[in-house]
Amino acid sequence: MTDLTLVDISAKSAGSLSELGSRLGSATGHRYDIAAKRESAIRYAAAQAVVSANLGIASLVADDGISVGISQSLNGSDNVDVRLPARGSALALVQRDREAVAGPGQAVVSTTMEACRITYRSDAADAAAWQIRVAISRSLLQDHVRSSDCFVAALVDNHAGYLNLFNTYAHALIGQAGRLAPPALRVASRQMAELAALALGPNARGIEAARTGALGRARLLAAKAFVTQNISDPLLSEEAIAAHVKISVGQLRKDFEREGLAVARYLRDQRLDKARDLLSEEGLQHWRVIDIAFQCGFRDISTFNRAFRRRFEMTPSDTRFG
């Protein structure tokens, strides 16, 4: 797979739109025709994320109104691109005389075997538009969807929450960039393809593959991300986590158990780990221990002290001053 995540460039460093297009083309095996409202303002950057034979993930940004024409693959790479705009952004994609426009919570899909044009849009004037681009080898997808027609200028909505799970998994892999061994990358590539198939319209094979593979893993990642985002909420519970992921508490427990985890213990340990980090931070030495306990979702200081001592075999004060 020729992958855009290998470059981190902007018009400022490239010098001009034509030079920018040339550099992108040499990195990805396409020809680029880039037009912008204000040539001096263009930004186009790719943060390296995941690169393997069958999967590429990049975080991209471009100014509002930039239009990028992309030729069909010049090196024979046959991938399906899934592009997910971030909050405040939108993407318009034209391929084979079809147009698909996606906002936050949606995605546009295209094939690298045919030329396309993508226009970046932002809710705010003169602001940048962001997207996550996931390139998946067609060979991983084609046997799991009802029709390959969904690879050409398709708009994907968050049916049954599958696109959210796909997005969560993509962000999780970005966070592990450079730390995944080849076997883990192969598994991740397959599971991302299974989740993409669920969002695009799976056949029976796609449904079964996701049910026995990617779905539980993606739900677990979504649950963990929700815990991290809401760790200071004392009301965060198994019920709240399950409701966010849109599954039952029983199913949530099963997803955690597959990794040898218990939901309640995981939540408590995450609170304690966060507390230890805050206690060790030099810039927060003026915070009282009780304030840190509350910041991490504990309701009373005695419960926090007991739990902290059991987990780390020292008191919160020992951690701070030891």
Image (cartoon, rainbow, N blue to C red):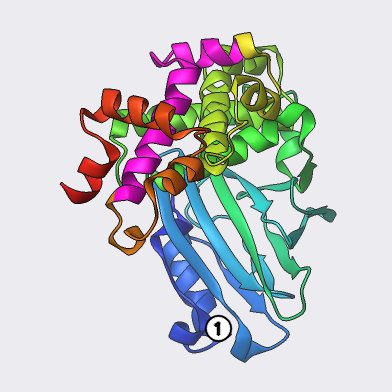
Q: Residue furthest front?
A: 302
Q: Residues within 10 Å of mark 1 (few under 14, many from 20)?
A: some
Give whichever of 278, 145 is nearer the camera. 278
Q: Is residue 279 above or below residue 207?
A: below
Residue pointed to by mark 1: 18
The magenta-colored residue range is 251-279
Can residue 36 be seen by looking at this rendering? yes
Relative to 247, 44 lies left or right: left
**271 part of magenta stretch:** yes
Residue 83 appears at what percent x and percent y? Answer: 65, 50
Give whichever of 161, 19 is nearer the camera. 161
Residue at 21% across, 27% down: 313
Give the number of callouts. 1
Q: Is residue 221 above or below residue 209?
A: below
Q: Residue furthest left?
A: 322
| Residue 248, quarter of picture | top right
Q: Is residue 309 above or below residue 265?
A: below
Can residue 140 be seen by looking at this rendering? no
**270 part of magenta stretch:** yes
Q: Is residue 257 above or below residue 309?
A: above
Give whichever of 4, 46 is nearer the camera. 46
Give whichever of 249, 65 is nearer the camera. 249
Residue at 32% across, 42% down: 276
Relative to 98, 105 lies left or right: left
Residue at 60% across, 81% down: 42
Secondary structure of residue under mark 1: helix
